[in-house]
Image (cartoon, rainbow, N blue to C red):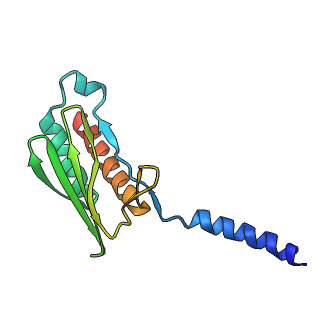
Amino acid sequence: MNMRFLFPLMIVLLIFSTGCRRTSNVIAPSGGTGMLATQGSFTAKDMREAIFKGCIDSGWNAFDVDEKTIEAKIIVRNKHTVVVSIPYTATAYTINYKSSVNMKYSLRGDGTFSISRSYNNWVNNLDQAIQRNISLKKM
C-alpha cells in the first residue's frame, strides 16, 4: 500500500525540484552588424547610438565608460539591480555581467557562475533591442 503512494509522490517531487530552479548560467550575448558593416557603412558611432537606444527601449540606463565601452544599469521594483559592461566596435558588441544586487549571483562547483533567471531575461531583452536598432540603422 505504501509503495502505491510513494511512487506518485516521488514523481511530484521530481517535477517540482526541476521546475522550480530559480538560477541559471550567466550569459554574455554578442551581436554584430553583419554584412553591411564589413562594407564600411556602419561606424562605431552608429553602434554606440544603437546600443544607447536599445538600452532606453528596454529600460536600462546607460553611460559611456570610455570611447569603446558603455555601462548599463537596470533597477527592477527597487529591489533588484544589474550592471553590465558593453564593449563595442563598428561591427560587434558583447554584454558582460559586471555586478548585481539581490540576483543570487554565485560561483558553482564546476567553475561557472549562476544568477537569477530574470538576469538572462533582462539581458536578452536588451540584446534584442540593440539588434533591432542596428537593423534600423543599417537601412
Q: In this view, does 115 lie above or below 4?
A: above
Residue at the left extreme?
67
In the rendered view, does 46 fall on the left or right side of 128?
Answer: left
Q: Which residue is drawn at 32% across and 48% down?
A: 127
Placement of the C terminus among the 4 image quadrants: top left
Q: Which corner quadrant of the image does residue 60 belong to?
A: bottom left
Q: In this view, does 7 lie above or below 89?
A: below
Placement of the N terminus among the 4 image quadrants: bottom right
Residue at the top extreme?
39
Q: Residue at x 16, y 48 (%)?
A: 70
Q: Which corner quadrant of the image does residue 123 belong to?
A: bottom left
Depth check: 110 or 8 in front?
110
Residue at the front extreme?
109
| Horizontal and vertical percent position of residue 11 | 74, 67
Depth check: 13 or 137 in front?
13
| Horizontal and vertical percent position of residue 79 | 30, 75
Depth check: 134 or 118 in front?
118
Total marks in image: 0
Q: Residue at x 22, y 46 (%)?
A: 86
In the rendered view, does 41 fall on the left or right side of 2?
Answer: left
Q: In this view, does 132 lie above or below 26?
A: above
Q: Residue at x 18, y 26 (%)?
A: 41
In the rendered view, does 27 fall on the left or right side of 133?
Answer: right
Q: Which corner quadrant of the image does residue 39 belong to?
A: top left
Residue at the bottom extreme?
1
| Horizontal and vertical percent position of residue 29 | 35, 44
